[in-house]
Amino acid sequence: MRILMLVILLLSIAATGCASGTGANGKVMLDGKEIVSVKLECADFCKRAGTPPFAEKTFTKENGDALKVFHKAIVNAEKMNGMLDYGVTFFMYLAFEDGTQKKYVLNVADEDGMNGLLVDTEESSQGYTISKDLTSELRSVIYGGSRSEG
């Protein structure tokens, strides 16, 4: 009986690990699907900046750890209480290996010490806060480093 319980526990842990994270082959997984690219589109707040950083930017595996940073921000964002009233800096589109896409609002300012905001557009009244440390990583990826502009 103990062996059966141990086997079930190990299988549960293995299945959970494959659902979200980085697989053994280096694939970035979310909800059991591989993320193949992240596209950011400059929205209202971004366009109002003195000089918008870009109109559109796409990140792929070739952009080093960029996909991992976006993934880490999504899975570690903390649910906020109450209803939101917010503007939009970026629309973020995750493209998966099966051809599906998921759309988020991502607000990351090009300033130190700020928390980011993540909103799944399917639940636009529910926001998630991104820690200052992860927001700093995102800022580095978004506003500097390797980029592919469109």
Image (cartoon, rainbow, N blue to C red):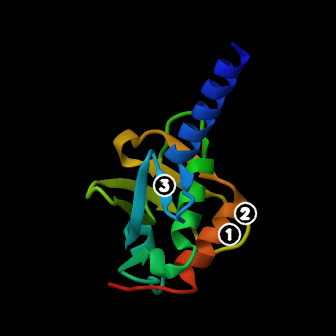
x, y percentage for residue 102? 35, 53
Q: Is residue 91 visible?
A: no
Circles 1 and 2: CB atoms closer than 8 Å: yes
Q: Amino acid at mark 2?
A: Asp
135 shown above or below 121: below
**Residue that appears at 63% across and 27% down:** 7
Q: Residues within 10 Å of mark 2 (few under 14, many from 20)?
A: some
- State the image coordinates of residue 123 (x, y, percent, origin top left): 39, 39
Q: Quadrant of the N terminus?
A: top right
Task: Using the image, tell me which numbered label, if any, was put on residue 133.
Answer: 2
Q: Residues within 10 Å of mark 1 (few under 14, many from 20)?
A: many
* Label annotation for residue 108: none
Residue 136 - label: 1
Q: Tag on residue 29?
A: 3
Residue 52 position, x and y percent, is 44, 82
Q: CA distance from mark 2 to mark 3?
A: 22 Å
Which sits earlier in the primary sequence, circle 2 or circle 3? 3
Q: Are marks 1 and 3 in contact (CB under 8 Å)?
A: no
C-alpha span from label 1 to label 2: 5 Å
Residue drawn 60% across the image and 73% down it: 139
Please state which amino acid type lies under the numbered disc 3: Met
On the rendered structure, is 92 left or right of 13?
left
Label 2 element class: helix
Residue nearest the viewer, comparing 12 with 103: 12
Residue at image point 38% right, 60% down? 94
Which numbered mark, 1 or 3, is in the foreground of this view? 3
Element carrying mark 1: helix
Q: Nearer the viewer, residue 49 or 133?
A: 133
Q: Secondary structure at mark 3?
A: strand
